[in-house]
Amino acid sequence: MDYTFVIALCQTLHPLAKSPHLTAAAYPDRIAKVSGKEQTALAWPWVMLDWLRVLGGGVCHQLPGHSLQVAGIPLPLCARCTGTYLGSLLGLTTVIARRRLRASLVPPWPVLALFAIFFLAWGGDGLNSYLTLFPGFPHLYEPSNGLRLLTGTLQGLALSLTLWPVAGFTLWQVPERQQVISFRETVVVVAIALAIVGALLLPLPAALLAGAMLSILGLLSMFTLLNTLLLSVLRHQEGKLQATRDLLPALGLAFALGTTELLVLDLLRRAAFGA
């Protein structure tokens, strides 16, 4: 089977990556059986994954064995990072959907206790997984991408919802003394997070591709949020925002800065490690 066209297309559109996963064996059989225009249409997911891998390369080890895969190609982030940034995106989306942009109070203590469990589970599973990299080193259980994804998703959700009140207090001239999320809302959002994890583990190619895109969007969103806070402090703009529209220029600048940071981090990684 000749996948030369698809491979050449991916590498032409993505000269930075030259991905080691970009091999003929990685592509579905049906790509080789269709004409040029149809091959171009079928190739876009693999081109997209390779581009997304650049954005994620500076913050994630991207080990194939630790990553969910679609058609034999790893997603742009490992399973744990995929979960972390999907969970973060879910948390930020919840804040927006519930109109809590100005909320400046952390969740109630039962929710904080639950979030603490999520952080401990994430850290414990990560440590256990890391220990397996050393042959013969004792560890509690065999790690799996399912657990990496689950603990990452719950930790990312907890992270974004814990961090947001800091943004609410820092950015707005008149922050609202309102909790960013209630216990009942947390139960619903955690259920949604579990459903997302389940959908990615089925696995369905469409769900995995959507997960790849949304995880990178979550990564960009977190970098944007952190850069917005940093720029606000550096420019002495704390407590200056009055209306939601006042936030847009700051978000635009922070997004551009975050994208640049991720690209630079990936280039530094490639310069240091060659992959």
Image: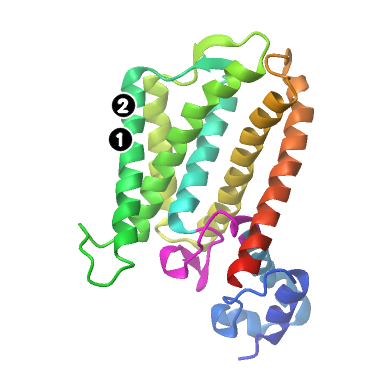
Which picture quadrant has residue 182? top left
Q: Residue at x 72, y 83 (%)?
A: 5
Which residue type carries mark 1?
Ile
Near-viewer residue (72 or 112): 112
Q: What crowding class fits label 2: few (fewer than 14 Cα within 10 Å), some (14-19), or many (20 or more)? A: few
Q: Which residue is mark 2?
A: 113
Secondary structure state at the residue bearing disc 2: helix
Q: Position of residue 213 (x, y in %)?
A: 60, 53
Q: Is residue 151 left or right of residue 99?
A: left
Q: Position of residue 209 (x, y in %)?
A: 57, 58
Which residue type carries mark 2?
Ala
Q: Are marks 1 and 2 in contact (CB under 8 Å)?
A: yes
Tell me the quarter of the image containing the C terminus.
bottom right
Q: Residue at x 68, y 67 (%)?
A: 47
Secondary structure state at the residue bearing disc 1: helix
Q: What crowding class fits label 1: few (fewer than 14 Cα within 10 Å), some (14-19), or many (20 or more)? A: some
Near-viewer residue (204 or 12): 12
Question: What residue range appears in magenta?
Answer: 53-77
Q: Is residue 13 above or below residue 229?
A: below
Does residue 275 appear in this view?
Answer: no
Which picture quadrant has residue 51? bottom right
Q: Position of residue 165 (x, y in %)?
A: 53, 21
Q: Which residue is mark 1?
A: 117
Distance from the alpha carbon under mark 1 to that under mark 2: 6 Å
- Residue that extends furthest to the bottom in the rendered view of this protein: 1
Q: Is residue 259 above or below residue 182?
A: below
Q: Is residue 98 left or right of residue 138?
A: right
Disc on res. 137: none
55 drawn magenta:
yes
Does residue 236 appear in this view?
Answer: yes
Q: Is residue 15 above or below residue 110?
A: below
Near-viewer residue (234 or 96): 234
